[in-house]
């Protein structure tokens, strides 16, 4: 799996296209024409069987994870909010007494899980997600990054 991170202004489709091309180059795969499909009820996807990708934006950052397997990625900036009220309202009862970093790590993990499984965010927020193939990455101060995937070979590319 490749994970791309940028702080440059770029539209989503251009970023997706550039990352797919780099993925094919990195793994020496043949390049093919593709279309990015956007359905209102699902995450964007390619009109190909593989690769799979997940896109996320927060603050000035854009990230994309791309893999041969289903993947969900989320980045969350640590904003000021009353996270204890939010966690009590939405999270599983065993996930409610959290510090700020823990809250945003968990939120990112749940959102990545929702994207990977293509389920509604509210269902993922209420799911106890321990042992759900989620990897947390500490890449940027005051941001949480989570990846949900069966693919555990991760390479991060900063653009």
Image (cartoon, helix red, strand yellow):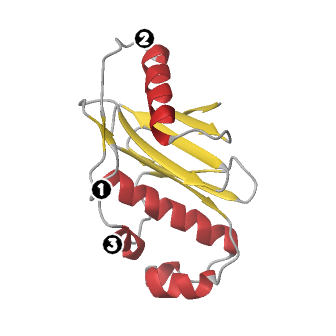
Left or right: residue 13 compared with residue 78: left
The residue located at (34%, 46%) in the rendering is: 44
Vertical arrangement, residue 54 with respect to residue 119, above or below: above
Residue 141 image offset from top left, x and y in percent:
76, 54
Is 106 in front, or is 57? 57
Q: Which residue is mark 2?
A: 28
Vertical arrangement, residue 73 with respect to residue 89, above or below: above
Vertical arrangement, residue 15 with respect to residue 93, above or below: above
Is 89 in front, or is 5? 5
Q: Earlier in the sequence, mark 1 or mark 3?
A: 1
Mark 2–mark 1 Cα distance, whole angstroms, equals 29 Å
Of helix, strand and loop, which one carries label 3?
helix
Q: Earlier in the sequence, mark 2 or mark 1?
A: 2
Residue 42 image offset from top left, x and y in percent:
29, 54
Number of other residues with Cα within 10 Å of mark 3, as a class: few under 14, some 14 to 19, many 20 or more: few
Of helix, strand and loop, which one carries label 1?
loop
The residue located at (42%, 59%) in the rendering is: 131
The residue located at (63%, 69%) in the rendering is: 102
Residue 118 tag number: 1
Vertical arrangement, residue 45 with respect to residue 122, above or below: above
Is 86 in front, or is 137? 86
Q: Which residue is mark 3?
A: 123
Is 68 in front, or is 158? 158
Whether label 2 touches label 1, CB < 8 Å: no
Left or right: residue 5 compared with residue 41: right
Whether label 1 touches label 3, CB < 8 Å: no
Residue 33 visible in this rendered orientation of the protein: yes
Residue 77 image offset from top left, x and y in percent:
65, 61
Mark 3–mark 2 Cα distance, whole angstroms, equals 38 Å
The residue located at (45%, 61%) in the rendering is: 111
Mark 1–mark 3 Cα distance, whole angstroms, equals 10 Å
Quadrant of the rendered structure where residue 132 is? bottom left
């Amino acid at each position: 799996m490749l994970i791309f991170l940028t702080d440059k202004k770029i539209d989503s489709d251009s970023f997706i296209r550039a990352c797919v091309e780099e993925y094919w180059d990195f793994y020496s795969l043949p390049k093919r024409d593709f279309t990015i499909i956007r359905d209102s009820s699902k995450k964007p996807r390619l009109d190909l069987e593989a690769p799979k990708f997940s896109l996320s934006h927060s603050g000035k950052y854009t990230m994309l994870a791309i893999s041969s397997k289903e993947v969900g990625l989320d980045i969350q900036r640590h904003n000021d909010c009353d996270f204890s009220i939010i966690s009590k309202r939405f999270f599983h009862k065993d996930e409610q007494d959290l510090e700020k970093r823990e809250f945003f790590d968990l939120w990112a993990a749940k959102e990545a899980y929702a994207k990977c499984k293509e389920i509604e965010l509210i269902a993922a927020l209420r799911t106890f997600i321990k042992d759900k193939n989620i990897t947390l990455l500490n890449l940027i101060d005051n941001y949480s990054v989570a990846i949900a995937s069966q693919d555990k070979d991760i390479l991060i590319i900063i653009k």
